[in-house]
Image (cartoon, rainbow, N blue to C red):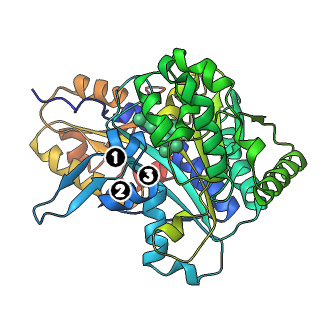
Amino acid sequence: MFKAPRGTVDILPGEQAYWRYIEEKAETVCRLYGYQRVDTPAFEDAGLFTRSVGEGTDIVNKEMYIFKDRSDNELALRPEGTASVCRAYLEHGMDNLPQPVKLYYFADIFRYERPQAGRYRQHHQFGCEAIGEASPMLDAEVIQMALEFFKSLGMTQFTLQLNSIGCKQCRPDYLQKLKEYYAPLAPGLCDDCRARIVKNPLRLLDCKKPGCQAAAEAAPKSSEYLCEDCRDHFDALKTYMEALKIEYSINHRLVRGLDYYTKTVFEVQPLEGGSQSALGGGGRYDDLIGELGGKPTPAIGFATGLERIVLNLKDQGIEVPEQKKPAVFMACMGNSAKIVALKTASDLREAGISVIVAAGDRSLKAQLRQANSVGATYAVIIGDDEIKEGMVTLRNMVTSDQQVVDPEELKRILGTQE
Ligand code: AMP
């Protein structure tokens, strides 16, 4: 028997109420903040991600699903959403539209990770990108939007962490300081961190290995090495956050796992669950569009994992609206009744009433049991007697009351119930 590949899950009908709920809240918040939906392909030229996410990152080095198609094109299943949206922004001339262009997406994301609770090889993200504006006002607004989204789901148990990791001007100096600080500590670090000192020093700060934590805690802080422009940006953002009464804590070790970030980075963390379990995160990426061949274009974005949100909603006991149950279950006995049942069901559906028709030759009792188990409000029963009279029996599944009605009356009664 086949099983779903390791690290992937089926989202079964019983789970869908959570997914629809999250998607609806996401759509609402996007409308309130003026974002428009974009959908991009599940795979892209692999180079798009190596160039944007960065050669030295875990995502590119260890986690990307990369393959050649039958024409020898090197492709990758998208390991994140931002690069694809930026590619689409450039490809479709959105740089000619009034800026910033505000886009949101739902996308399945593929990363060859070690599967565990809340960490999968295919997961789903809701993300938004505001492209073409450098003002920290936009940073404040994107962060606010992310928090409003979580709040609209009924979630309260989370915190916001904020940092600034500088820009092309100031980061090289900071990275040099980090390297100098870490060089003598190298023997005590994990293998990955020893490699990071040379390849990707920023990522030293968010190593999760216990042996590397103390070194990261005491490391030089990026916010203390910002150039004037980055410092002003960060200060202005903090002022806006205070004006909007958004609580945050500064986390000097917050650097994010992708190379394209500049200035502002942030993460939303659940109160319980540890650092592996960020609900969402984002930041500025002022150089990315330029690196993808566009003119220099500042931008900021945010993304969150839907699986983690579902886990969190369940942990917090947050109830989501049930999905609509079918209004009618159509029970029938005998061959002629089957035809009448199919026709009656078509008429009802045309009138916008949802119907499940019993198929097969089960007893009336078994059919009514099924009506109960699918949660139908009514059963319509058609047998020889009903056919002779040109009527149907309508049974209220909650009260068990039954009445014999003609098809027009049936439509009228059910139509007012939907
Ligand atoms: P990232 O693109 O790494 O910033 O991830 C954005 C969000 O996606 C995270 O905060 C998580 O909520 C979610 N996420 C990232 N990786 C995974 C994964 N492997 N499985 C499930 N959710 C994930």
Mark found first going from the N terminus, 2 or 3:
3
Q: Nearer the viewer, residue 112 or 5?
A: 112
- Residue 355 disc label: 1
Determine whether 34 is above or below 361 in the image: below
Image location (x, y in percent) of residue 131? 60, 67
Q: Quadrant of residue 224?
A: top right
Label 2 – label 3 distance at C-alpha? 53 Å
Q: Quadrant of residue 175?
A: top right
Which tag is nearer the camera, tag 2 or tag 3? Answer: 3
Element at badge 1? Answer: strand
Q: Nearer the viewer, residue 26 or 407?
A: 26
Element at badge 2? Answer: helix
- Marks 1 and 2 in Cβ contact (< 8 Å): yes
Q: Residue at 83% across / 47% down in the picture? A: 238
Q: Residue at 28% across / 54% down in the picture? A: 76
Q: Is residue 343 visible?
A: yes
Mark found first going from the N terminus, 1 or 2:
2
Q: For this view, does 201 lie left or right of residue 397?
A: right
- Label 3 sits on residue: 54
Element at badge 3? Answer: loop
Residue at mark 1: C-beta within 8 A of ligand 1: no
Q: Nearer the viewer, residue 385 or 3?
A: 3
- Label 2 sits on residue: 349
